[in-house]
Amino acid sequence: MIRQASASTDSGLLIVLTVIMAAAMLCAPVIRRIEGNYFRQLFRSHREAQPGEKTLGERLVVSLALLQTLVFEALMLYCCLGAEAMPPLASLAGLLVLTAGLFVAQMAAYGLTGYAFASADEAHSWQTAALLMQALTGYLLVIPAMGALFYPDYLVLFATIGAMAYISCRIPLIISEFRIFYTTPASLFYFFLYLCTSEIVPLIAVWGLSGMFSSLFC
């Protein structure tokens, strides 16, 4: 059932989204430079470390972009749930806890997998790539998430665009992972196991838990 657009008139929700988008847009030039360096290095030697944030200012910029990603992932979940009876801001806060939990769990899985199957430099390069791709995702989710909020009749279209944006940001990360972890043909089996456990299963779990977390603070 498609949700009515009541949340699009909630002043608290709109203020939060506006502040986050405005701050993220101010950070966009720095993110563009860091992401550009990453993509230039993507198809070079897998032994070469992926460039990432180096200064405190760059780390803060990436952190803000990551926050934007988590918020708009939560907003997409909220729109897809059709939870029109719940307070929008409180429901979004609960879903934000869920998306943040997914992010922390994935980064922990990356760290554990890198520690077990890669060198310290390769593991750090992989985690850097994961952070950069997650930061980029937030910018690509702004339009589909806001479209789903203000035009619920086109929810399926905007949800599809959002899913494609998410997948497009995972592809470069998967390429980085493949270049790091592929050593022999037999390692492909372990690589596909990784994709299922660290990329696909968490998304299924998030969708299954989204209804419970949407009412966490309601």
Image (cartoon, rainbow, N blue to C red):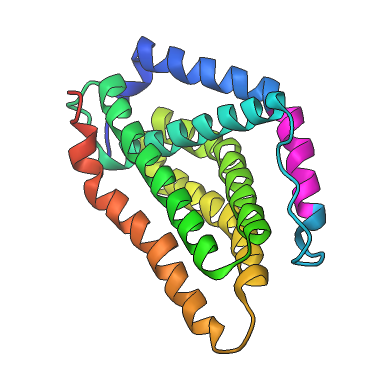
Q: Is residue 122 something one can see in this rendering?
A: yes
**Bounds of the magenta segment:** 28-39
Q: Is residue 153 something one can see in this rendering?
A: no
User: With respect to residue 141, does 194 lie above or below?
Assistant: below
In the depicted view, which residue is nearer to us: 85 or 42? Answer: 42
Q: Residue 34, image x and y in percent? A: 75, 39
Q: Residue 7, image x and y in percent? A: 32, 22
In the depicted view, which residue is nearer to us: 93 or 123? Answer: 123
Q: Which residue is drawn at 36% across and 11% down?
A: 12
Question: Which quadrant is the C terminus positioned in?
Answer: top left
Give the side of residue 38 with respect to residue 89, left or right: right
Give the side of residue 160 with respect to residue 208, left or right: right
Give the side of residue 191 with respect to residue 11, left or right: right
Indicate the quadrant where residue 35 lies.
top right
How many numbered marks does the figure carry? 0
Residue 160 located within the stretch drawn in magenta: no
Residue 30 located within the stretch drawn in magenta: yes
Question: Which quadrant is the N terminus positioned in?
Answer: top left
Q: Which residue is drawn at 39% across and 33% down?
A: 75
In the depicted view, which residue is nearer to us: 117 or 212? Answer: 117
Q: Residue 3, image x and y in percent? A: 27, 34
The secondary structure that dominates the magenta segment is helix
Q: Residue 33, image x and y in percent? A: 79, 37
